[in-house]
Amino acid sequence: QLRPLLGRPLGADPSAFLAPAGGAAPVQTDLPDDVVLCSCSNVSVGTVRAAVTEHGCRSVGEVKTCTRAGTVCGSCVPLLTKVVNGTLEKAGFTVSNAMCEHFGMPRAELYALVRAEGLRTFSEIVARHGQGRGCAVCKPVVASILSSLGIGHVLQPDPVT
């Protein structure tokens, strides 16, 4: 969160940046357009914002395709996501935190539901909280959730296909 501000005024009390994650409200810093967001592809925050506002990009994936930001090492993707979502919200668009088209919630929320309800197979999870047959995004996520909950081998007896 601080790397893009190197050599610039922080815009907030410096001690606010030292609070542990979840301890205090996050510090709101609006990055200037000339800050380099992706050093691998030399893409600035302004270029990312222009991709959203002027070129019609409506997702991180579309911005990656348009600007090449986040396509080399990937370390800037969390900041890229924040900038894209913030720009979309300022433009009046609703930003979805859905994992994919099959699950309308993020991974953490799905994990909590699977754990609380004791679901044990991909089919049960899709029947209760999803739709369709799954995709290359949600299948590995569900397999990871089941595995981390100690369900056993995720391919037995209900394969995640």
Image (tube, rainbow, N blue to C red):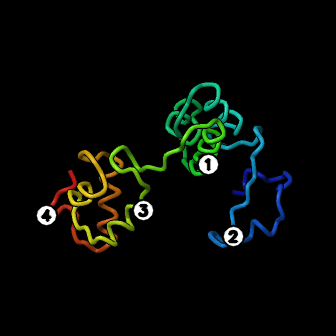
Give the distance between the C-alpha atoms of the residues marked 3 and 2, in whole angstroms.
22 Å
Q: Is residue 126 above or below residue 39?
A: below
Percent from the top left, x then y, of residue 49? 66, 35
Q: Is residue 44 above or below residue 100?
A: above
Q: Earlier in the sequence, mark 2 or mark 1?
A: 2
Q: Earlier in the sequence, mark 1 or mark 3?
A: 1
Q: Residue at x 23, y 46 (%)?
A: 133
Three-letter residue code for mark 1: Lys
Percent from the top left, x then y, of residue 106? 44, 56
Question: Which dot marks residue 157?
Answer: 4
Extreme-left residue of the structure = 157
Percent from the top left, x then y, of residue 104? 39, 50
Give the distance between the C-alpha atoms of the residues marked 2 and 1, in whole angstroms.
18 Å
User: SS for tag 3?
Assistant: helix
Q: Is residue 140 above or below residue 17?
A: above
Q: Residue at x 29, y 70 (%)?
A: 117
Q: Is residue 135 above or below residue 159?
A: above
Q: Which residue is mark 1?
A: 82
Q: Which residue is mark 2?
A: 24
Three-letter residue code for mark 2: Ala
